[in-house]
Amino acid sequence: MKNIVVLTGAGISAESGLKTFRDANGLWEGHDVMEVASPEGFRKNPELVLDFYNQRRRQLLSVKPNKAHHALVDLEPYFNVHIITQNVDDLHERAGSSNILHLHGELLKARSTGSIDAIFECRKDIRMGDICKKGFQIRPHIVWFGEAVPLLEDAISITEKADILIIIGTSMQVYPAASLINFVKPSTEIYFIDPKPSIGQNSQKNLNIIAKTAAEGVPILVASLIGK
């Protein structure tokens, strides 16, 4: 079986009704990014940060996967499929995809501020005073700006083996995720699905642009790849 690696960004989840964190003016839901998505912001105003993610978590639990999420599952009988997502939602999991790597963490998980390895499921609001077994405050399991991306090496290793790379709903402007395209083999076929593509047809070898939304473009590409 050929290896397909799928890199997804906010565009695929937006079509489920999930707001993208970053607005056109650079604010995250009305907040400066460093206020709600950095270790410094958490130290300065932890209540604000926890409330920000509590609202995002509640919103996530109210939406469902869309046609794009479901179409990716249809590839699995025909290919070895790995999804590398910049999204912190669980919509790929709910759609039924098997192999998902969350580069930037997971909204439905929390971790101890005392240990990056103390990670657990969390579907409820996190409040100040919620502590782990060792007495440390609990925080969202999100990779904030200025923090290391623990799964980056795993993502690179997966991308290096790709025979086909599919990029969906991402601006390819957020690093280090955007750098993954540089690790594919020279022969790898690349498909970029986005209504307003941010990379040009001639900027990458073997690049195919599908200028459609995720819900429109992914089912079309999947049908083509599996010969339907």
Image (cartoon, grey):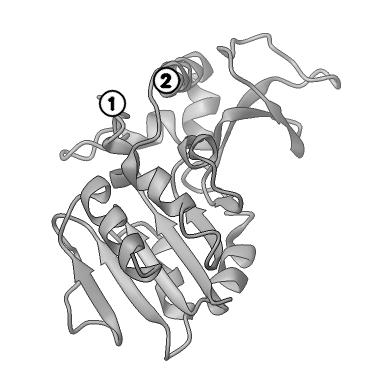
Q: How far apart are marks 2 and 1 (CA)?
A: 8 Å
Q: Quadrant of residue 202?
A: bottom left
Q: Give the number of marks.
A: 2
The reply to whether residue 148 is visible in this rendering is no
Q: In which quarter of the image is residue 126?
A: top right
Residue 110, x across and y down, in percent:
64, 27
Between residue 68 and residue 127, name the one nearer to us.
68
Q: Is mark 1 on a helix, strand or loop?
A: loop
Residue 187, x across and y down, in percent:
42, 90
Q: Are marks 2 and 1 in contact (CB under 8 Å)?
A: yes
- Closer to the chain start, of discs 2 and 1, is 1
Q: Mark 1 points at which residue?
A: 29
Residue sitting at x 30%, y 55%? 218
Between residue 143 and residue 121, name the one nearer to us.
121
For this orientation, the residue located farthest to the front is: 228
> Is 112 left or right of 36, judged from the image as shown?
right
Residue sitting at x 58%, y 13%? 124
- Image: 65 above or below 176: above
Residue sitting at x 58%, y 52%? 101
Q: Mark 2 points at which residue?
A: 52
Type of amino acid at the residue the image marks with label 2 = Phe
